[in-house]
Amino acid sequence: MNFKLATWNINSVRLRINLVEKLLAEQNPDVLCLQEIKCINDAFPLKDIRKAGYEHVAINGQKGYHGVAIVSRIPFKKVETKEFCGKGDARHVSVELDVPGGLQLHNFYVPAGGDEPDPEINEKFAHKLAFMREMTEWYGGMKKKSENRMVLVGDLNVAPLEHDVWSHKQLLKVVSHTPIEVDLMNEVIASHDWVDVMRRFVPETEKLYSWWSYRAKDWAAADRGRRLDHIWVTPALKDAPQSMQVLREARGWERASDHVPVIATMKL
């Protein structure tokens, strides 16, 4: 089957439900994963989502902060959430999609980590590092099977490659691109042999961003972006991706999120 998947840090789903509806209408994905929904489960705009044709919804919400959701045209066979670092934060939700051969989809919002890349003086950065270590332990503890069909998406808040940021040299000491974060992301990738779908279509030598700061007066002219949003698949699905798109124009939509949707099509 043909499968279209989108992931987007929406930065408040209630504030930007009109943009979610616009994306669903224009791109028509089978599944949309949202991060930073910033609402409890009961406050999620279910009516609007279902009116758009997405009957199946999995939510792990939190009042005013964090929160993740998966909206889908495809039914779920199972919905699960996992808590990381014992903080009670809503940063993960996974579903098993009812498709031939099965498909497990994990949606993450990794902590941003604050401003100072020193875990000794910055508790937020320490939390981020601990979160990523727990991800490695969790996936490393899963039995690797050649037939495992898993997809991991979300705002992982790390731009790992040299050309995932506007200036590798200038951002080496800036949270999201520091060597320790990159090393930990590589450990998560190695834990289950994840394949980076976005870089299957855009060579590592080319710039690739999914986030542009609100601080820039003209984000497009400055173009100081970072690739913080990711789509990974297990080796069983390494040949499944057919195309990938970063919807850059969404950064220019009215009252836009600072992240833009990343969309992949796959043949399952």
Image (cartoon, rainbow, N blue to C red):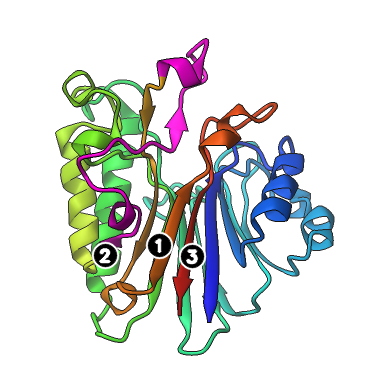
Q: Which residue is mark 1?
A: 152
The location of residue 17, given as percent across then percent down, is: 74, 43
Tag of residue 246: none
User: Magenta segment range?
Assistant: 195-222
Tag of residue 194: 2
Q: Is 113 displayed left or right of 212 in the figure? A: left
The location of residue 59, given as percent across then percent down, is: 63, 59
Quarter location, residue 71: bottom right
As drawn, 205 above or below 99: above
Q: Residue at x 16, y 22 (%)?
A: 169
As drawn, 148 above or below 15: below
The location of residue 119, given as percent across then percent down, is: 23, 30
Which quadrant of the rendered structure holds the C terminus? bottom left
Q: Residue furthest bottom?
A: 100
As drawn, 55 above or below 200: below
Q: Which residue is mark 3?
A: 265
The residue type indicated by label 1 comes to Leu
Contact between labelled residues 1 and 2, with CB atoms less than 8 Å apart: yes
